[in-house]
Image (cartoon, rainbow, N blue to C red):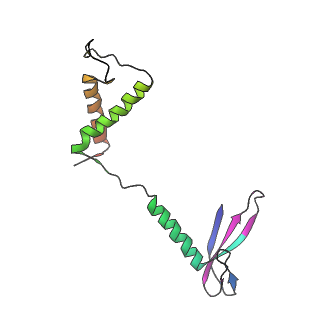
Amino acid sequence: MTLCDVEHYAFAPKRCNMCGRRFWFEPYRIYLKEMRPSGASIKQIECLSCWHKAQNLIDKYMDMHQRPASRAVQEKDLPEFVGQLIDIFEDFLDNRGIQVDNPERKETDEPVAIIYGSDYGELCDKIENLLKWWDLIGD
């Protein structure tokens, strides 16, 4: 763990612990580097150049791992999206061997879908209403 201190200014020559460069008359940073397993901390000096390199790496990492901008489901994609959500629940029920009794299913029908007929329609309507309530459906 690294605890950063505030920026300092070098009036006397200093040596950077990161790159080994000697510098003076420029800003630098002091931080404490925790050493394991003893838990003792060592005072470290980081020059302005290394400080900027580290900050650039942090910024690059944050840009790469930033969450994508929120994207609403488009109206034209809504039936496919809702169908995929229902498929997730169907797979979940199927993996646990659960069958839903549905009076619309005929005795001769093979059990191809667990969520069937009006049950499927009811779930679609409820999911669409929920998406509209949370403003997740775009124009």
Q: Please give the name of the residue rendered at 62% of the width and 88% of the height, measured from the top-left corner.
A: 25
Which quadrant would residue 114 be assigned to in this image?
Answer: top left
Q: Is residue 90 above or below residue 33?
A: above
Q: Quadrant of the N terminus?
A: bottom right
Which contiguous range is marked in magenta? 19-42
Q: Is residue 57 above or below residue 91?
A: below
Q: Please give the name of the residue rendered at 27% of the width and 16% of the height, measured from the top-left corner.
A: 109
Which quadrant would residue 82 be assigned to in this image?
Answer: top left
Q: Please give the name of the residue rendered at 37% of the width and 19% of the height, measured from the top-left corner.
A: 99
Q: Position of residue 18 (x, y in %)?
A: 65, 74
Which quadrant would residue 64 be assigned to in this image?
Answer: bottom left
Q: Position of residue 95 (x, y in %)?
A: 44, 26
On whether residue 36 falls in the magenta region, the answer is yes
Q: Please give the name of the residue rendered at 34% of the width and 32% of the height, measured from the top-left corner.
A: 87
With 99 as the anchor, is 109 left or right in this view?
A: left
Q: Nearer the viewer, residue 113 or 49?
A: 113
Residue situated furthest top in the rendering: 107
